[in-house]
Image (cartoon, helix red, strand yellow):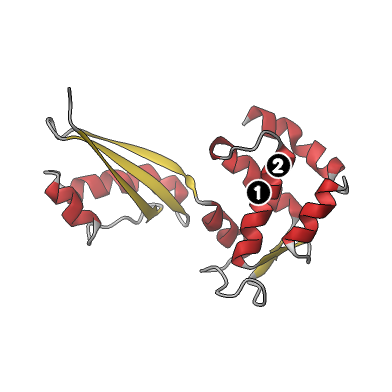
Amino acid sequence: MPRIRVVRLHVQGGKASPAPPLGPTLQQLGLDPAKVVDDINKATKSYEGYEVRVDVIVDLDTLHYDLRVKLPTTTSLLLKAVGAEAPSGDPAHKKIGDLSLEKIVEIAIIKKPELNAKSLKAAVKTILGSARSIGITVEGKDPKEVQAEIDRGLYDSLLLKYEDRWRSQ
């Protein structure tokens, strides 16, 4: 039975480096850090500008490894959408940007494979919660207020417009 080790890391798409802690960790496993980092950068190139999780699955007996690239983090998608570098240190009082509800819906559709939401409406409310926690307003309002408006059906026509994309994702 092969001995397997999984190294989980968060990297900027296409910009991993063999600097600590990644390089020494890969070296301890018997891998060539430069080659693995090069493979990670090739695999994450399409996510340039986003933070993504990469799992490096290593067979310790053969030193063969596989890479599994996850979708960009919700925070990374939201930050890029508002053009911010980092979340607000005080999201209740300091806002870093405003997004349209349509952009929130698009992010929900991108994240569908990793969300536990059973409907587009639930997924959008999840993304709204993330937006609120990092200091982003939606349609000029607190995302919690937008969640309540969604519950009241104010955005049903907008959500219906995206329903086919949600189902096909």
Q: Are marks 1 and 2 in contact (CB under 8 Å)?
A: yes
Q: Is residue 74 left or right of residue 38?
A: right
**Quarter in which the C terminus is drawn:** top right
Q: Please, what secondary structure does the residue beneath circle 1 have?
A: helix
Q: From the viewer's perspective, is residue 19 above or below residue 52? A: below
* Rendered image: mark on residue 126: 1
Front-lying residue, 110 or 126: 126
Number of disc labels:
2
Image coordinates of residue 23 in percent, x first then y, are: 20, 55
Tell me the kind of residue under disc 1. Answer: Thr
Q: Please, what secondary structure does the residue beneath circle 2 have?
A: helix
Front-lying residue, 143 or 42: 143
**Quarter in which the N terminus is drawn:** top left
Q: In this view, does 79 lie to the left or right of 16?
A: right
Image coordinates of residue 98 in percent, x first then y, are: 70, 65
Residue under the point 74% across and 57% down? 100
Residue under the point 56% across and 60% down? 80
The residue that mark 2 highlights is 122
The Cα atoms of the two marked residues, 1 and 2, are separated by: 6 Å
Residue under the point 67% across and 43% down? 123
Image coordinates of residue 156 in percent, x first then y, are: 85, 42
* Rendered image: mark on residue 22: none
Q: In which quarter of the image is residue 36?
A: top left
Tell me the kind of residue under disc 2. Answer: Ala
